[in-house]
Amino acid sequence: MSDTERSIFSRIIAREIPATIVAETDTLIAFEDIAPQAPVHLLVVPKTEDYRNVTELASGNPALMAEMVALAQQLATERAGGDFRLVFNTGPSAGQTVFHVHAHVLAGTLGEGTLA
Ligand code: 5GP
């Protein structure tokens, strides 16, 4: 795969682009979103680029999706008392801009009834 075909997240995983990495496992990486929308705003990203969105991930590798949720919980517990919002933007009109599945972990004091 050429550099232009690889996602920005694959380039963060490869340490080609800097990011504030907060956790890493054999299968996942988590780092701070560059444009935070909440007091805690992390991205949890599978190292594989095989799944473009959460629908593909849920049908193709539900165990990996469960790992993402568990890591999100761990990070929210470490940083914000354990409560969190998990967002998977799915499709351009829903705000997805990076087509390498990722979960937004939003935590801290969040507004009631808001989506971010
Ligand atoms: P999406 O819009 O696809 O749901 O989420 C992509 C997220 O990736 C956005 O919240 C955006 O701020 C974040 N993002 C895009 N480029 C970078 C980057 O180079 N570094 C980091 N840390 N986050 C990025």
Image: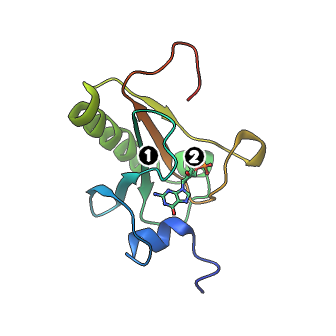
Provide residue 13's location: percent of width, then percent of height.
40, 69
From this view, report whether residue 82 is shown above or below residue 25: above
Q: From the image, which quarter does the N terminus lie in?
A: bottom right
Q: Amino acid at mark 1?
A: Met
Marks 1 and 2 close (CB-CB < 8 Å): yes
Inspect this view and state whether residue 49 appears: no
From this view, report whether residue 15 is shown above or below residue 32: below
Q: From the image, which quarter does the C terminus lie in?
A: top right
> Residue 41 lies in what quarter of the image?
top left
In three-dimensional space, the C-alpha distance between marks 1 and 2, rounded to whole angstroms, equals 8 Å
Residue at image mark 2: 54
Q: Residue at x 58, y 83 (%)?
A: 3
Provide residue 22's location: percent of width, then percent of height.
28, 53
User: Between residues 78 and 2, which one lies in front from this camera angle?
Assistant: 78
Question: Outermost residue toward the top?
Answer: 112
Under tag 2, what secondary structure?
helix
Quadrant of the image where one finds ligand 1: bottom right
Q: Residue at x 43, y 69 (%)?
A: 12
Sequence-wise first label, 1 or 2 = 2
Provide residue 73's location: percent of width, then percent of height.
31, 34
Residue at image mark 1: 65
Question: Outermost residue toward the left?
Answer: 78
Inspect this view and state whether residue 110 appears: yes
